[in-house]
Image: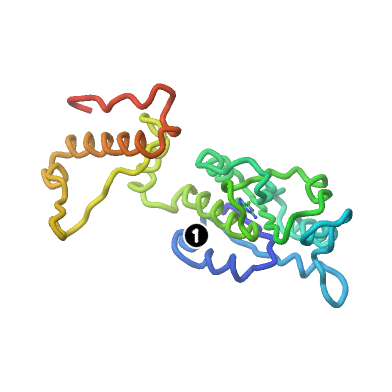
Amino acid sequence: MPLRIDILTLFPAMVQAVLSESIPRIAAEKGAVEYHLANFRDFAEGVHQSVDDRPYGGGAGMVLMCRPIYMALRDVTARDQRSPHLVLLTPAGRRFNQDVARELAAKERLLFLCGRYEGFDERIRQGFAWDEISIGDYVLSGGELAALSVVDAVVRLLPGVLNKEASAEIESFALGRHGRLLEYPQYTRPVEFEGMRVPDVLLSGHHGEIEKWRVAQAVQRTRERRPDLLPPGGAERPKEGKD
Ligand code: 6GU
């Protein structure tokens, strides 16, 4: 059965635009995932269908109200028998990374709630067992771009979405025996461009040598740019000789 992803947002068109392109679209076309969007403004009351209000105690900005979100969650949850893993996008959440993407990719149903404005009424947090997730230490105008980042990272891990080669690449390089490494440099035609040449080893046809070079480049690049990704003490140097 496809992974079911429900996304609650005030901006469904913004979310749909991203899900309709590239890998997120292919994942749905291949039957690995189903997307269901809901606008929680549809669950708000009154002629204005307000979803936000001024904070008790004063202060700048508006706060998302409990009722429309509770109503939307109750309604959307009941649209499928599986109970969803609830993801709340918030800068106060745990930091998203590839391990979290793998965790989420193993669920059978995910529900994302995208906030806007300055925050949520705290009772939205209290009422549900949220997995609160942040995508980094910066402030976005809303949870949509964060949810879409998470969805993209998750659906490309689902079985059958990427070809075998690309999946193997994620396995061996993103999380493999050398730890998490940044990508090695890639080249395509022409062999020479503006005086810059493709490294000879890549033209040599020696697959063992090419693999050794790539691992060494990835380790070096990671050491220089993201030493925090390497295991304590640093990555072991790629072995000389056969591999
Ligand atoms: Cl999940 N939401 C918002 N609004 N800003 C963020 C974020 C989430 N993660 C990083 N910045």
Q: Residue at left 24%, top 25%?
A: 239
Q: Nearer the viewer, residue 1 or 159?
A: 159
Up-down relation of residue 154 to residue 68 (above or below): above
Q: In the rendering, at what x and y percent does residue 104 appear?
A: 58, 44
Q: In the rendering, at what x and y percent does residue 221 appear?
A: 32, 39
In the displayed structure, does residue 26 sit left or right of residue 100? Answer: left
In the displayed structure, does residue 10 sit left or right of residue 215? Answer: right
Q: Quadrant of residue 120?
A: bottom right
Q: Residue at left 56%, top 51%?
A: 150
Specify whether tag 1 is near ligand 1 (CB below 8 Å): no
Q: Residue at left 86%, top 57%?
A: 58
Q: In the rendering, at what x and y percent does residue 212 appear?
A: 22, 34
Q: Amino acid at mark 1?
A: Pro
Q: Residue at left 33%, top 47%?
A: 165
Up-down relation of residue 177 to residue 194 (above or below): above
Up-down relation of residue 12 to residue 198 (above or below): below
- Residue at the disc numbered 1: 24
In the displayed structure, does residue 59 sit left or right of residue 97? Answer: right
Q: Which residue is situated farthest in the bottom direction here?
A: 47
Q: At numbered mark 1, what does the secondary structure look like: helix, strand or loop?
A: helix
In the displayed structure, does residue 236 sit left or right of residue 116? Answer: left
